[in-house]
Image (cartoon, rainbow, N blue to C red):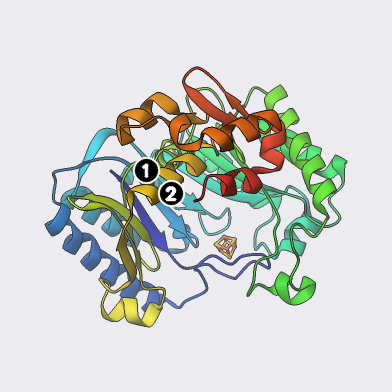
Amino acid sequence: MEIYVHIPFCVKKCNYCDFLSGPADERVRQLYVDALIKEIEGHSRKIGRNQQVSTVYFGGGTPSVLDVGQIQSIFGAISSNYSIKPDAEITIEVNPQSAKGKLLEIRKTGFNRLSIGLQSIHKSELEYLGRIHSFDDFLECFIDARASGFRNINVDIMTAIPGQTDRMLTETVERVCEMGCEHISAYSLMIERGTPFYEQFGDTDGPVVGEETERRLYWMTVDLLKEKGYKHYEISNFAKPGFESRHNVGYWKRVPYLGLGLGASSCLETADGDERSRNTTSLQTYLADPFTKEESNILSRNEMIEETVYLGLRMMDGVDTDDFEKRFGVTLRSLYSDVIDDLVAQGLVYEGSGSLSLSDLGIDYGNHVFAKFLK
Ligand code: SF4
């Protein structure tokens, strides 16, 4: 099992962000930590120590806006209530600015992987995106992370920002690679409802820089990172060998996960099938009762099959078809014979001896391919 912990606080909302996050004062943050610990303890009575936890991921929001004592008490509650494997991957997302002076203590608490939101090395792009940190803040954070003992660091960068030239993107990618981080996530800017950018650009269907430019910048990023020795292992993720995010790979392979915190989703195995649920997205409701669910349902076999295919296809290794047969007692080909034949003929997927994966063209038309597997 994997554990995800949602910390819904940020110093300031970025212009593109539609995550469940926002600023909150110290009193609310402490109330949240108290509610979260209550939820952690409550679920453990149900799940107990029966399941080994292979990864823990503190995401958000920005977990580093909490003070170190709060992070320690949340992690302490998890480690004393669940069976975390000795070699578990334990990640925390941080913002270069709010992480200042906290990393050594965070490392000592047990976190062994750091994910730093940088997005760009350029001041103009950081300002445009509404980020609160500078590139110098990032450098300081990265150096501090290494000095604190972090040997597994992800850096988030962003492509397809309006005004981003090839040179600017190349400089960001090259500078991040020079730092020697083990993992890079590179996402294209998309305009999401309810964000300041949505007010500015309205209902855009796709990237604001246009589909063609976005694709060109995407492939430029892929090529640069491959040249620098990073393995392109998922549509938007790159890692040095052996540093693929175990937490995210688990998600794409449908390892059961327990989501804790505001709006967090879980997918856990039950006697009736996989149970998908989502916590309330109302902070007030969560603070009053952290066990309030917004939705909960048992997935049908068909839903599990569809998820296995479209999540699996996100990874460059694709869906493991032998594993699929073991899980569902039927071959992927027998279920989707015509779909697979069509997609292979169009050059969108490869069918290997034990896998089905996207081609480069298939990556460009990912959503079209995924939709073909939904019945
Ligand atoms: S720091 Fe991350 S979670 Fe917070 S507003 Fe910015 S993008 Fe969203």
Quadrant position of residue 349:
top right
Image mark for residue 239: none
Name the kind of residue labelled 2 in the image. Ile
Q: Is residue 326 above or below residue 312?
A: above
Q: Residue at x 45, y 55 (%)?
A: 59
Q: CA distance from mark 1 to mark 2?
A: 7 Å
| First along the sequence among labels 1 and 2 | 2
Residue farthest toward the top in the current orientation of the protein: 353
Q: Is residue 238 left or right of residue 217?
A: left
Name the kind of residue labelled 1 in the image. Phe
Image mark for residue 111: 1
Q: Residue at x 54, y 37 (%)?
A: 313
Please tell me which residue lies in front, 279 or 109: 279
* Tag 1 near tag 2, CB within 8 Å: yes
Image location (x, y in percent) of residue 274: 28, 51
Q: Residue under circle 2?
A: 92
Quadrant position of residue 222:
top right
Tag 1: Cα neighbours inside 10 Å, few (<14), some, or many (≥20)?
Answer: many
Q: Residue at x 74, y 36 (%)?
A: 221
